[in-house]
Amino acid sequence: MGSNAVLRLTEIDGAGHSTVLCSIEVSAASTTIGRSSEMDICFGENDHSVSRNQFEVSFSGDTPKLKNTGRHPVLYKNGKKQLEAGAQIKIDSGMEASFRESKLRFDVEAPAVYCLKAKAAGGRAEFEIESGRKYTVGRSPECDITLESAGVSRRHCKLETGASGILNVHDLGSVNGVRLFSNGELQPEDSDLEVPPGVKFLIGDIECVFNQKQQAGGTKKRVALPVVILLLLLLVGAVSFFMLKPDGPPRPPQQSTSKEDLLWEKNIKRIQALVHDKASFDKKTKHFSKLAKDPKLGGLVPLCEQLGGYYSQCKTVEALNISLPKVYKQRKAEVGSSIRQLEFDFETTLSFRKLEEEISKLKALHTAVGAAAQRVGIEVPEPSGVLASAGALLDSANDFGEQAWRLFSIWTDLENSSFSASKFEKKEMVEAIDVMFPGEGLDAEVCSKIEAIIHYQQNASAAYEFLVAQVGVVVSNYTEIGLSEQLVPDLLDKKVLRDALGTPLPAFFDSAPPIVDVSGSLYSHLEAISTEWTNLGFLTHCVRWRADLEQRERVFPGVAEVVLLVDALCEKAAQKSAVDLEAGMEPYKEVVSRLGPSAELGLNDANKLVRVYALCHEYLHHEWFGTLQDERKNEAEAVGADCLKRVKEQLIKEIAEASGAQGAAEKGKYVKNAKNLLEVLDSRANRLPPAFEDEIKGYRNWVRFEVSKTEHE
């Protein structure tokens, strides 16, 4: 019975009517049958010769077994054999269990089996295909069906046979695809094909044909008619001979110890001796496999089959006990290397699930074969040595995984808490390493390295926290005092900074951690603002400081707290700079109110107006104020423009007076006034608007010419 086969149960009543009860698939669970409604399958409700709990169906591998769980024997095989209460037998297809008013028939239905024939230049191959099962086809040995051809992809397609016997072919994104022959012509590629039996199709460059496979024993041979007649004649003759033969002397009664009984006892002893033999599991497996094919064993053949499977499983577990310690040793070496390098990125589980599954299977087989052997008086000992070794190996693997997880958790805590000493569970780490690597002294080496890292991080964190506090002091001092030379205390005398700067970088770090880099930047900025600044100059530095912090925030998010403090400095510096601007425009207002619109502008007043213009220009072109749209900006623009306009108008007046002067002395006086005005403008030449320079270019040239002419005279 294959893995896809099913066991069909049919109830036959006294009138010969059949009713299919259910189909049972191969399963590890058992199925109960009986007259009670509490059973998995209810049978013979009106037949009181059927027990309430009559049968139990189970599977040994793929072999179905029937156990009589009722209180009375049950007849089967047309009443020729009797299944005693508590006994178990193998279920043959078509077997019937007979009761007073009904029968229960067991039919094993095997799945349809098909054949895939593949033909290529290198030869032919044939593959068995079970109905309902999925197969992968490709060049890779990992595929269910391997086709060795350059025209076939590693995972080329998937095959599945439906209930109708049609082969479904699904392309898995291969290079050369799958194609179908129709009426002898090759069709275009298609990602999904439906191939009827007998129709050719291509997998890459391999020609394939799909057909249903003939089942063994499926074709019955016919007996020739003369042979049948001859057999009938022989039968009639034999009957006549015995009917006509005179009665002889009475036959002696049969002896109770027949040859069959003696052979049975001999075979039991033979099996028992082999079970208790000290031979290897491999030899026992071979011996019982050989016995299972010996017809002399008769009814003991199923037991020999079970014993062969049992000792084969013992051999499997024994082999794992030898191979898995090598895996364990290799994993320990990998983890030890990772810990020494302070990586802690190892796999925290050492899974021997295969061994666990094989142990469970072995225990189940021992229970089953032990019960079967006990019914014929044979005790099958448990493989205690194999199980003990496997159990010890599993315990070691579980301990290893548990300690690996402890180490991984401790390291993760250290990383997540910036290596805080309060989180460093040194004792737990030592215990975990001692369990995993007893006597190797690995814990002292590792803990020493980690303590050096923690010490370095503590110093770096303390320095960073101190510098952040100093930024807070700057904000407070600037807000309350406003004197830049008193903003920052003497940083170099602080012991915490000297300790941080003097701590050597542990080998664990390829480069200084981000917190150290950020601390160095903070230190540089604090030193820079310790000198004397104007409010506008201080604002310029703070804006650049903030941009620098935003760049560093990408690798050290903790610096966001400093960004907020510097933002506060920018806001305060901007407010104070705005006040400075208001104060700087006061000379302009004083000059304008004192002179009126048409009064002469003296050199001293002209100098005041040019300085006011320069101040307005500096504020208007500052990155912080340049984006503002408010009355203060509009006022600064208007005041600056008016300052230049008034100086230019006075320059024009001086030139006009010089041009209309009668004497050389009078003309020289006005030319000198014009020259002085130009010198006042030239003192701020780098900030004069280009348009303004163009406007006074002609006047500048005239003054230069007149001054030159006077000097030559």
Image: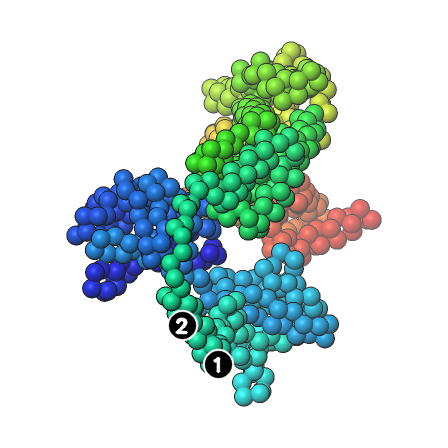
Q: CA distance from mark 1 to mark 2?
A: 16 Å
Image coords of residue 65 (percent x, y): 41, 48
Q: Is residue 684 above or below residue 42?
A: above
Along the line of sight, the residue nearer the viewer: 322 or 705: 322
Image coords of residue 650 (percent x, y): 57, 47
Is residue 601 visible in the rendered structure shown here?
A: no
Q: Is residue 183 left or right of residue 47?
A: right
Kindly identify which numbered label has been placed on residue 236.
2
Q: Which amino acid type is shown beneath numbered disc 2?
A: Val
Classed neighbour count for the residue bearing mark 2: other residues with Cα under 10 Å, few (<14), some (14–19), many (≥20):
few
Along the line of sight, the residue nearer the viewer: 154 or 200: 200
Which colour assignment does the render follow?
Answer: rainbow
Along the line of sight, the residue nearer the viewer: 556 or 83: 83
Q: Residue at x 78, y 51 (%)?
A: 709
Secondary element under disc 1, as helix, strand or loop, is helix
Foreground label between 1 and 2: 2
The residue that label 1 is drawn on is: 226
Q: Residue at x 43, y 58 (%)?
A: 5
Among the two numbered marks 1 and 2 on one chain, the one whose residue lies closer to the N terminus = 1
Secondary element under disc 2, as helix, strand or loop, is helix
Image coords of residue 393 (percent x, y): 59, 28
Classed neighbour count for the residue bearing mark 1: other residues with Cα under 10 Å, few (<14), some (14–19), many (≥20):
few
